[in-house]
Image (cartoon, coloured by chain):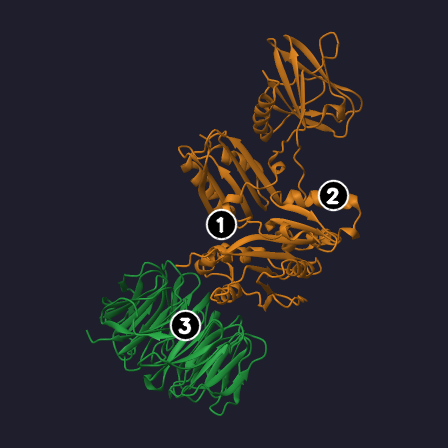
Chain colours: A green, B orange
Amino acid sequence: MSGLNAGSTRGVIRQGWSATVGDYAIAGGWSLGGEALMVGDAEGSVYAFAGKSGATAWARREIHEGGLLAMAVHPGGSTFATAGQDSRVLIWNATDGQVSRTIDVGSAWVENVAWSPDGRWLALSCSRQVHVYGADGAEAWRSEDHPSTVSAIAWSNAEELATACYGRVSFFEASTGKLQQKLEWQGSLVSMVLSPDGGIVVCGSQDNSVHFWRRDTGNDSMMSGYPAKPSALAFDSTGTLLATGGGEAVTVWSFLGRGPEGTRPGVLEYHVQPVTKLSFAPGAMRLASGGRDGAVVAWSLNRDGEGSRIGNGFLADVVAGLYWRPDGRALAALDAQGGVTVWRVGNN
Amino acid sequence: MNTQQKVPVSILTGFLGSGKTTLLNRILTEEHGKRIAVIENEYGEVGIDQALVIDADEEIFEMSNGCICCTVRGDLIRVLGNLMKRRDKFDYVLVETTGLADPGPVAQTFFMDDEIRAEFSLDGIVTLVDAAHIEQQLGRSDESTEQIAFADVLVLNKTDLVDDEALDRLETRLREMNRMAKVVRSKQADVPVDTVMNLEAFDLDQVLEVRPTFLEPEYPFEWTGVYTLDAGRYELSLAEGPDPAMSLVVVSDQGTDDAELREGAEWCVRRYAEPAEDVSPGDDIPAGKHVNLKLDIPGDKSFFLEVDTPQRVGLFAQHTAEEFDLQLKNAIGETIGHEAERTWVAQHEHDDEVGSIAIERDGDVDPERLNAWLGKLLMERGVDIFRMKGFISLAGESRRFVFQGVHMLFDGQPDRPWGDEPRRNQLVFIGRNLDEQDMRLGFDACLV
């Protein structure tokens, strides 16, 4: 199911196409250099849509029993991984929807999956462990149990994996699993993002705060006062701006100069319900935000964190995913009713 | 944007061996056809196919502020957060805790996390009690005490292993600890499913659906006799009885109807809170004062009352008249019959640190004073207050204000108009080492 009418849009957000999947759209990603959009949903189905038209290229229904939980497209763009409540990770060929490899971790949900930036490693988290697999599909190592279930994973660079859990961010050497650094703070870390150079690690915490560490000094800072838990976090590609959710406003911290400590953040107001997703356009000071209100907003930001709204789109339900096409000229948005919407994005 | 009904969640607690898994299986069998998700934390043997059983590690997440009231179950947030995304949502969620769990963080999860609160409603806390072993457990662990204190329903299970007398004693003890909970007895967790599910115990509309008897106030005295007396000198004689002393307050101008007796009783509660003055046999008893009659010498004892003007005099005594064969005699030694008599629910000596406090008062409450009192109480004692429920008559508000809470988390709102109903207040607190007298006086100071 797809069509070329994608609701009302304004500004740089222009009409594109829309389609639907079977249930809550959990995760997505662009593959094949932006030629295809992959989407996974809560019934465990995986879909591939043609990037330009929205036509369904292929679909595999209910392949993750219980539901899909995570998806990651390989940096090469031709394969991608999905993970689910069925304790499995599947490695797919994006073109034809064939599963080239299956990893079964046993009994736990696989809640996170991430490729290293060079595509050599695949990391997954299940319960209190992370497992890392090599390009050949062989398991390279698995961690010991973390103090609690791993809530987020991210690669700080091609050689190092970061994990977040209750009270701790850990860094592991990609090839051996050796623990390189451990940053501790008593709080339930629910989200994590790393600056593009890997030097700053930022976590959203259950107690409505954002906590970050500068890894070279080990110094940490906390931004509190958010009305809700900041589960959406995003760094721009230069590492200057950190956009955070945690309420109806998007709060943007600038790392220029000695900031963000002691500076006032940019506050972007438009959403009438809490922000659920944030994503920076590749190589641009352009941010997309999505909320529980179904609104998607494109913002143009200054280096001090202030910004202005340059476009809008609207979805039928809670925004569940935002994915810029690699060229930054289209934005895919997923919603809680299974809506898949792709808008073209203009220059101004 | 989700306007769908929230999914109810029941929490099942109880020590290992108390029958949680048996009860779970029973619910799943009887509720066949409903989509139920079970979140388990220890090796259970749930053997019902259609239920989704999820094993989750009990992950207690404390916040950096160190506040125990902000402590939540991180695993529940994750698991429920994923479950609620499904279009074919669940009809019901059952969370089984480990035997040693403190129910606080589980309950708080449904208040503290906005996304969970938007999709799920905490229906009630059901605590299974192994009738044969609970007494030992209560002596040994705080957790079992807390599980009882938090409960909306106490299932007194394995009753076939204990004799009736011991069961009654146990039930009395449990009720004293938690007078808010409904107590049901069972042999093999064979209780009707509707006694443990769909309780809506955390629904403000249901706050009043508590057992009516639990608000019968307790008094520091057991008996009142009212006598019509002329001016003169009277002798109060007591035979040997069970105690070497007895507290007493003599009230002048005491009425005899029920309202007047209650009014006198409330007045005496305050007198009883004051230190008692010792009175030895042969001495006069001052009116309006808390006295301690010394009864430690053998044989009959006499005390004296001086009455200036004809009036009705009320004796509010720590024990019933029968226990000491209490008699009031005039100057020529004739025994005078009482015009009215009443016994009260006596305050128990609470052996357990955990208990219930019920406050019931007529009239309106000043909202500002109430806020100040409750705010201070929750700040200072929130850690020790497990549950609270009730309704309040706020001055200037045409509707009842209903509230409930867990530790420091407080949830309240106006509900239906008072209409012709007499305006009054009912509050119940369940907690550890709560000072009943202090709380009563604190609340009374809020009355207009």
Q: Chain letter of disc 1?
A: B
Q: CA distance from mark 1 to mark 2?
A: 32 Å
Residue at the (22%, 75%) spot, across then down: A346
Tag 2: Cα neighbours inside 10 Å, few (<14), some, or many (≥20)? few
Residue at the spot of label 1: B408
Read off the chain for label 3.
A
Which amino acid type corresponds to the residue marked 2 in the rendered image? Arg
Q: Which residue is mark 2?
A: B169
Amino acid at circle 3: Met
Q: Quadrant of residue A10?
A: bottom left
Query: Which of the two residues, B106 or A36, is positioned nearer the viewer here?
Result: A36
Task: Name the secondary structure under disc 2.
Answer: helix
Q: Are marks 1 and 2 in one subunit? A: yes
Question: In this figure, which residue is indicated by the disc labeled 3?
Answer: A192
Crowding at mark 3 (Cα within 10 Å: few <14, some 14-19, many 20+): many
Q: Quadrant of residue A18?
A: bottom left
- In the displayed structure image, the side of residue A328 where residue A189 appears, left or right: right
Question: Which residue lies at the image location 74% right of the left edge and 7% below the top edge?
Answer: B332
**Residue A37 visible at all:** yes
Q: Is residue B132 above or below residue A163?
A: above
For this orientation, the residue located farthest to the left is A348
